Image (spheres, rainbow, N blue to C red):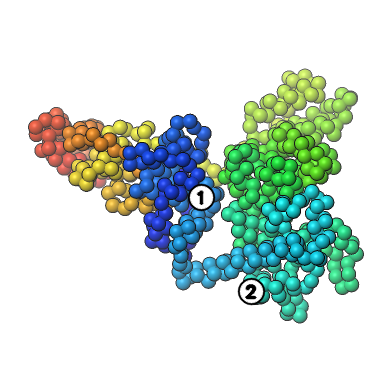
Amino acid sequence: MAAGRRYLLPMSISEGEIAQVRAATDIVALIGETVALKRSGQRWTGLCPFHGEKTPSFSVNAEEGRYYCFGCRASGDQITWVRETQHLDFIDALRALADRAGIELHDDANAGPARKERQAALSAMERAVEWYHQRLLESPDARAAREYLRSRGISGELARKFKLGWAPDEWDALSVALKMNEQVLVATGLGFLNKRDRRQDALRARVIFPIFDPAGKAIAVGGRILPTAPDAPRAGERVEAKYKNSPETPIYSKRKTLYALNFAKDDIIKSGEIIVCEGYTDVIAFFAAGLPRAVATCGTALGEDHFRLMRNFAKRIVLAYDADTAGQSAAASVYQWERQHEVDVAVARLPKGSDPADLAQRDPEALREVIANAVPFLEFRLDRVLEGANLATAEGRARAAEVAIEVIAEHPSEFVRDDYKVRTADRLRIDLATFRQRYADLEGRPRERVVREIPNEPMTRRPRSASTLPRPGLEALRLYVHGPEATKQRFIAPYFTNEIQRDVFEALATGQSLSELIDALERRGQDEAALVLSELAVEELDQTFGASDVTAVVAQLVRGAVREELRSLDRDMREGRVSPELAMATTRDVKERVELLEGPNGAAAEGDLRQWLIERASLPTS
C-alpha cells in the first residue's frame, strides 16, 4: 500500500483471511505477468511500471511479498499491486487474489446477509445484461434496434464489445426468462411490482447500454427508446423519456460511476488523458474514431466523486460536451477540483450544433483534432464571452472587458489570472495598464468569489525515504531486518535518536511480519515509518557484513544516542533538575566509556552505556 493510503476492513473480512491470501499469492509471478523481472541476488528487479525509467529501480522481495521502487517510491504487497494496476478498491483486489488462489473468503454473522444480497444482485445483473445482449443479436423484434445502432455508426463489433442489448416491448419478458424473484428484481432496479402485485420489467422497447464498474462487473443498465417510436402515448400510458437508467441500488451509485471506464482505463493510463462525454453513444463514437479513452456520467452532472475517481487514471481531463453545456459548468467547482485533485481540465471545441457521435460519423479526423486542440477551461469560457461580444465598437469592447474580468477573477491562481489579463487586453485592444486598473477596481467589489483555499485539505509533505535519514540508524535497521537473529539483541530503542527510525525499530521488535507491520503503521498514520520499512524490505544485506561491522554500527548508534542524552542532561542541570556536581561526574564517566567502545573493553563499555541510556529513557519528561 502506498504511503498515506488508508483502508478499513469490513467486518466480513478477517486479518487471518487477508494473511492467507497474501501467503497463497506468489508476488514475483503476479508482478511478472506485466513486468519483466530478473533475479538479482535474493531479490528480483525490473523497470518500474509506475514511472518512466531506463535503469531498473523496481525491486521485489519474494519472501516478504513486498515491492518497492527506489525511483518513485511506489511500494506495497500483492493486494496493493492489484489495486494500483487494476484500479480496484481494497476488497475487490483481495477478492480477485482470493479467486486466483482458489480461496473462499467467509463472511461473519453480521455481514453475511448483506454480502449475499450484493452477490445475488451482481449475478442477476450479469445474467440480465447477457440476456439483453442476446436479444439484440438474435431476436427478430430487435431488427429496428440493430438498424438504429448502425445508423449511429455503431458496428456489430462495437455492439459486442459494449455488450449492447435490446429490451423487448413486453411487460415481464426479462423477469420470466431469468426466473428472477421479487427481492432481486427490485434490488437491482431491473423491475418492480405493479399495481396488480405482479413482477414487471423496468425497461421495455429500449436499446440497452450496460454499465460496468472499473473491474468489469455489470452494475446497472441504461435504456434508450428508438427514434422511430411514436411520440403519442398508447391508451393509458404516459410519454416515455428518451433515456431511462437504473435507479441507485446497493451495487450502483450514479455519482461514483463513469460509463465505459472499464473499457477505457487502459488507454486512459497509456495516454494520460480522459475524455468525458454526455451520452453513451458519444462514448462509443470516440472508440470508433480511434480514441478509446472516453467515459460518460450516468444521468447526473459531473461532480466531486467523479473527479476523485478520474484522478486515479489520468491528470488531463477533456470535457467533450456541446458548447452550451460546457459553458454552464460551475467554474468555482472546476477550479477547486483542479487544485484539490491535481488535474488539468480542458474543453474540446466541438463545432456548433454537433455532438461527438455526429462528428465521429461525419469526420473522425476532425473529432481527433478537436480533442488534441482542447483548451484550458478558463480559455474556453473567455472565448465564449468574447465571441459573443461586439468587438467592432469601443462600447462593445468595454462591455466585453467587464464580463471578461469577472470570468478571469474566478480562477484561483494569481499567475494564471495575470496571463489572461495580458491576453484579453490585447484581444480587446485595450491598454494593459487600464485593464489591470479596472480589474483591481472590480476585484474590490463584494461578490461571490471562488474559494482560494481548499477546505479540509491540509498541506501534505512527501514522506521521506530511508536514504534521507541518518546513516547509522539506517544500517542498524538493515541489520535488524536481514541480519542473523543474534544481531538483533545488540539494538534497543534508545539507540535510535531519529523518531522515524525509532518507530520502525519498535514496530520490528513486535515480531510481526513486514507486511503486517507496514499495514499497521499506515493505519496509524505513521507513513514515513511505513515507507522506510517498505524500502528496507526489498533491500539486500551486504554478505560481507561481519561481527566487527556490527560492532562499528552499534558504536556509531551509541555515540549519537549518548551525545543527545548529554545535551539533555546539560539542560536538566541548567534548569535545576540535576545538581552540577552529579551532571559533571556523569558526563565525565559516560565520555570515558564512549572512548572504550571499540577497544578490548568495548563489550563492557557498551553494556554500561546501554544501561545508562535505558535508565535515562525511563525518566519522566518535564
Farthest residue toward the bottom? 196
Is 546 above or below relative to 31?
above
Q: Label 1: state its secondary structure.
A: helix
Amino acid at circle 1: Arg
Quarter of the figure that contains the C terminus: top left
- Residue 186 location in percent, x, y? 67, 71
Q: Going 30% across and 42% down the picture, which residue do you hit?
A: 502
Q: Quadrant of residue 480?
A: top left
In this figure, what is the number of numbered marks?
A: 2
Q: Quadrant of residue 311?
A: top right
Which class describes the residues within 10 Å of circle 1: few (<14), some (14-19), or many (20+)? many
- Residue 15 location in percent, x, y? 40, 60
The residue tagged 1 is: 83
Q: Is residue 311 visible?
A: no
Q: Going 72% across and 32% down the picture, which residue do you hit?
A: 373
Give yes or no for contact between labels 1 and 2 (Cβ–Cβ under 8 Å): no
Q: Label 2: state its secondary structure.
A: helix
Q: Quadrant of residue 18?
A: bottom left
Q: Going 33% across and 44% down the picture, which residue do you hit?
A: 503
Numbered badge on residue 358: none
Amino acid at circle 2: Gln
Q: For this view, does 595 lie left or right of residue 306?
A: left
Q: For this view, does 203 lie left or right of residue 15?
A: right
Viewer-side label of 1, 2: 1
- Residue 230 location in percent, x, y? 89, 63
The residue tagged 2 is: 183
552 or 432: nearer the viewer:
552
State the CA–CA distance, disc 1 to disc 2. Answer: 32 Å
- Residue 360 location in percent, x, y? 78, 42
Is 495 above or below relative to 525?
above
Q: Going 76% across and 80% down the picture, which residue do you hit?
A: 196
